[in-house]
Image (spheres, rainbow, N blue to C red):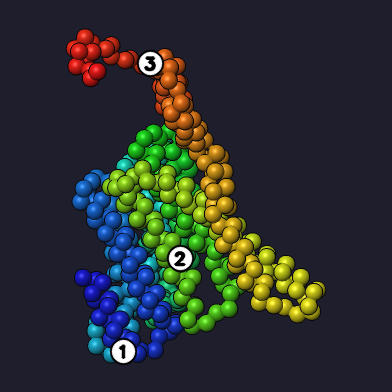
Amino acid sequence: MSFVVMGVLRFLNASTPTAAPRNPLVLDFCFWLLFVTFATVGALVASRWPKNAIGWIFCWLGLSFSLGSASEEYALYALVTEAGSLPGAKGMVWLTSLFGGPIVFALFALVFLLFPDGRLPSRRWRPVVWLELVAVVCLVAWAFEPGPLGNLGLVRVSNPFGIQDAAGLLGTLGLVGLFMTLAVAVAGGISLVVRFRGARGVERQQIKWFAFSGVVFCAVFAAGPFLWTLPQSPATAWIWPVLFLAGASTIPAAVGIAILRHRLYDIDLLINRALVYGSLTATLLAGYFGGIVVLQRLFVVLIGERSTLAVVASTLLIAALFNPLRRRIQGFIDRRFYRRKYDAAKTLAAFTARLREETDLDALSDNLVGMASATMQPEHASLWLRPETTDAKDDAPD
């Protein structure tokens, strides 16, 4: 319902001047899609495992965005578009700063501690939860600090609930809450590492999904400074925010897959492909731009001017190197990070070749047992062959 209200008010405020530049519609849609993803995953998890707090946290994250955005659009309509037409406009700006502030990050920090089953790794981590609760209380108290609200939003008003006599104390509590939240996030990251080291089977795969989404998000975030150095225009200004939101959306998607256990064991293949094609892309880009620079300098030396043939030659070179380079990178990744599977595949391939040539049954049996031991690594392996019966001999064709 809040998403519908936000959309209607967004339409009514389309031509209203705002205190800060309004985001492009495509960016607002990406924000909407991100937090709908949070809310959907949270609802699915909470409906199946009501005791798993991660589902309820994700529901709140999705709801907080919609409520915050709807409150901001409500305030803009009531204060600027149709001034005085609706009550409680300044209070809505306060709600926007509360819902969209550090409290959202503080609640998300709990996910690190509780993932994937909604329980702490052990009782030793309970003080971290208490620290998180104190941080949330401090951040809520910070919302009552007097002063302007919505400095980065569409509407700027003074805090209607500000307590003037406690301004210094409330500001200090806000800073304490921020540092506590960061401490909880760091402790949550450490708890995930502890969980992963002791995890086996399903839980290990679940943590891999969460870690993979975190790496994707950090990679997109790290690409921001590079994208900011590119020439900016109204047509390209939204590229970085959209990429950022796309990277952030991998987190609820990965958490949903991990907790709901949908195609859980695909994560190993996904990580493998990400390593291979990420390395391949970086290598090809470096080779492409390096080839252009070298060839352009060569053309300047030979003919005294630049030539488009450098771009054509670099493109053809990259096209020729794509498959050989991909196979080499794939082999290196398999040997370096998936050694056990790589050795098992090589052993199985060697056995298959031996199977086509071997005629001695005893030697073939020994090879089969050796292959099973090398690939599956059981504590004990043996081969039992059913003895040939008299009836089987009689029934055998001449």
Q: Secondary structure at mark 3?
A: loop
Q: Which mark is residue 207?
A: none
312 with respect to 195 (left or right): right
Specify the quadrant of the image occupied by residue 362: top left
Q: Residues within 10 Å of mark 3 (few under 14, many from 20)?
A: few
| First-in-chain label (2 vs 3) | 2
x then y, percent, for residue 347: 48, 30
Q: Secondary structure at mark 2?
A: helix
**Relative to 395, does residue 252 appear above or below in the rendering?**
below
Mark 2: which amino acid?
Phe
The residue at 30%/45% (across/down) is: 261
**Residue sitting farthest toward the front:** 398
Task: Choose between 369 and 24: the one closer to the eye.
Answer: 369
Q: Which mark is residue 382?
A: 3
* Residue annotated with mark 2: 244
* Residue annotated with mark 1: 81
Mark 3: which amino acid?
Ser
Mark 1: which amino acid?
Thr
x then y, percent, for residue 297: 76, 71
The residue at 59%/57% (across/down) is: 321
x then y, percent, for residue 361: 40, 16
| First-in-chain label (1 vs 2) | 1
Question: Is there any visible trace of residue 141 in the rendered image?
Answer: yes
Task: Choose between 81 and 282: the one closer to the eye.
Answer: 282
Per the model, the C-alpha gap separating discs 2 and 3 is 54 Å
The residue at 41%/64% (across/down) is: 246
Q: Residues within 10 Å of mark 1 (few under 14, many from 20)?
A: some
x then y, percent, for residue 34: 35, 65
Q: Nearer the viewer, mark 1 or mark 3?
A: 3
The residue at 30%/75% (across/down) is: 71
